[in-house]
Amino acid sequence: MSLRTSLKKVLPPISVTEQEALDAGDVWIESSIYQGKPDMAAVRNLPTGKLTDEEQAFLDGPVVELINMVEDFELCNEKHIPQPVIDFLCKNKFFSMIIPKKFGGLEFSPYANSTIVATIAAASGAIAVTVMVPNSLGPGELLMHYGTEAQQNYWLPRLSIGTDIPCFALTGPEAGSDAGSIPDAGIVTKGMYNGEEVLGLRVSWDKRYITLAPIATVLGLAFKVFDPDQLLGDKLELGITCALLPKSHEGVELGNRHDPMGVRFYNGTTRGKDVFIPMDFIIGGQANIGRGWQMLVSCLGAGRGISLPAMGVASAQTAFKSTAEYSFVREQFGVPIGRFEGIQEKMADIAGKTFLLEAMRILTTEGLGEGIKPSVVTAIAKYHMTELGRDVVNSAMDVQAGKAIQRGPQNTLANGYASLPIAITVEGANILTRNLMIFGQGAMRCHPYLKEMVDLIHSDDKAADAPFNQVMAKTVWFSVKNSLRSMKNSYLPFLRHSESQYAEVKGYEQRLNTLSAKLAPLADLSLLVLGGDLKKAELLSARLGDVMSYTYAAMATIRFYEQRVSDKAEAKPYFDYAMQWSLGQAEKAIVEFVNNFPNTPTRSLMRVLTNTYSNSVSSISDDLVRELSTAAMADNSIKAELTHLIKTSPGDGNDINEQAFKAKHAVMPILSKVQKALRAYPVVPFISFEYAIGEMLKADHINAEEHAALLDYNNKRKLSVRVDEFTFDLELVDVDGKPIVVSQSDAA
């Protein structure tokens, strides 16, 4: 019995859905990470993502107008998104950013798509989700790639101008992550359509969690097709298929809603029982029966890297901006709270991770802009960018404390905090994405020989032994080279490589090259020893995926620092924190992987190959925490670059905080003067700041102009630290205690 035959008996077969997922999408720079040689040259040479004049005009025009139409606090208290807002979205083609211009769409780049969605998300999660869904996985994307010419010519112009609003239904009560087990079925049969008998499908389905379903006019639907009468051939089960059904079609049920965390985007159910549809309803026509899963995973791979990561970045930038400004303006014990080390620890983490997130957003969308559909990178982006967004907002909630937990129009965090689990959950739950997809897909796609070897193992061709042996030999030599590279980088640091022209980058680049070099033999050995069981060992495989992910994050951070920031001196503490945190997380994952590997001899070999003998992992120093937290409260270019997604409106929470923040920076020299004078000439009694500076004006310690500037700052400060108030019956009141009764629909 040959080695190939022996392995075939041992290794579990790959299901059709697994195979189609593995085949979907492209391999990009993640391949170089997996193989132990991160391709920083490819990262550095990637064309810079920029907004075209048309995209910038859309951002400055319709997007800003949309944001000014929506007050998110009021929206959360309503039952519906106001119809004028929906009409505005349709009229201005917000639902057609990915649709080509020849069909009436905007045809924006992935970078522009991400920037627009993130900008909207910073103002309203509900509106952002409403915009993002038609521009991610849905009928539009599927029609563009797989639709017939007739389907494209009919549907895409209607989707472009909002004549039709789409939704896509995949998830149901019995199948979520295990999409291949969907019970929804279509039976090949003949039926009546438009007065004549045609070949078609009789479909029954029950779906939930479908975004836009309650207002959709056209339903994208995934179901399994069966042909018991063998009208199409000799196969009974034909596989997952995607179809497009008008809401008006007899038997289609749309309209019932869910209530996702009180966030007022439309999400709900769709059902149908024995609904007859002609073959023309199948996306791509009858020829695409059974291709649905391949179509879905191919399209999802790209969309997953844009919309939900954009929401994670928007959450982080909002949290960073408001927390930095609040920490500077809010004082306790006579000093800004941002100077207390407990706050500094949180503030540094917020600032560093916001820098990291923006770097990942830009690199990922720049790659997608080149026409690449990297399924592993987009999975990395979806998981880590939504999780990091949650981390940042959680820290911001801790810092802003009582102000953060009180809802109201001045609150910049509460609604975003409530909506965070949504981004974590949809388009592939994060636990699934981390534990099964990133390394599981990454190993098969990124290894130069593994996929070919597995295909040969499961081949029924008796002549497959010879090519298998050739591939096996290449695999062994590949693993040997990986092991030697790992040992060289682990034990001989003076041989570590860096191509950066910046001295402050070189050490980090050498460190990420070393981590990547360690990943390669760890992955090879785990696959060799555990084989197919590695798929079940999620705790282990997830850690290998983490090494890939954090290395990718570090590569993105280097590119962002080298090519995008306008002032490197201002950006350096942000860069240092982002690099040290991401590389530290990768190192931690390696240590935990090696420590928990179940085979003792292999574990010992892993330690030798990677120089992993202790549990120590470099941590971020207290000095860097202090430096970055102080830098975060400065009013400078890097803060502006890391908060560019937030568009303030006069009188909103972000505007109020910003006004106080800038006013305090403007009067800092005068405040210093006042503090010195107060120490020399104390004002007794010190009733209030206004009283104290009034007394100092009388004593000629400050002049009238300085007094006016201080009063202006103090008024803005008091408004910034103010918390929204309501009457006993929860009617919003203004700063003078007078009720404000304005509904979202009235405002629109």
Image (cartoon, helix red, strand yellow):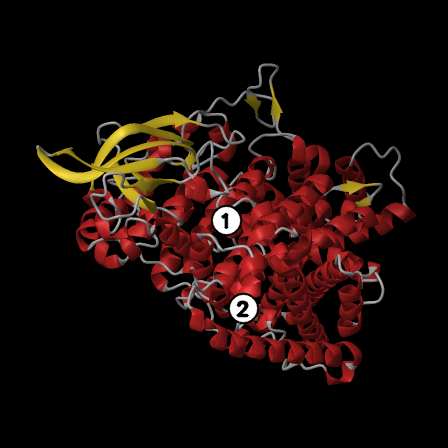
How far, Cα to Cα, is label 2 from label 1? 42 Å
Q: What residue is shown at x 40% (from left), y 44% (from top)?
A: 133
Q: Amino acid at mark 2?
A: Arg
Compared to residue 23, the image places residue 696 above or below, namely: above
Q: Locate residue 607 relative to residue 235 in the image: left or right.
A: right
Q: How many marks?
A: 2
Q: Amino acid at mark 1?
A: Leu
- SS under mark 2: helix
Earlier in the chain: of badge 2 and badge 1, it is 2
Position of residue 319 measured from the top left corner of the image (x, y, whole percent): 62, 46
CB atoms at circles 2 and 1 under 8 Å apart?
no
| View extreme (left): residue | 195
Crowding around mark 2 (Cα neighbors within 10 Å: few <14, some 14 to 19, many 20+) is many
Name the residue tied to disc 1: 308
Name the residue tied to disc 2: 4
Name the mark nearer the viewer: 2 or 1: 2
Q: Locate residue 571 relative to residue 42 in the image: left or right.
A: right
Q: Locate residue 16 relative to residue 645 in the image: left or right.
A: left
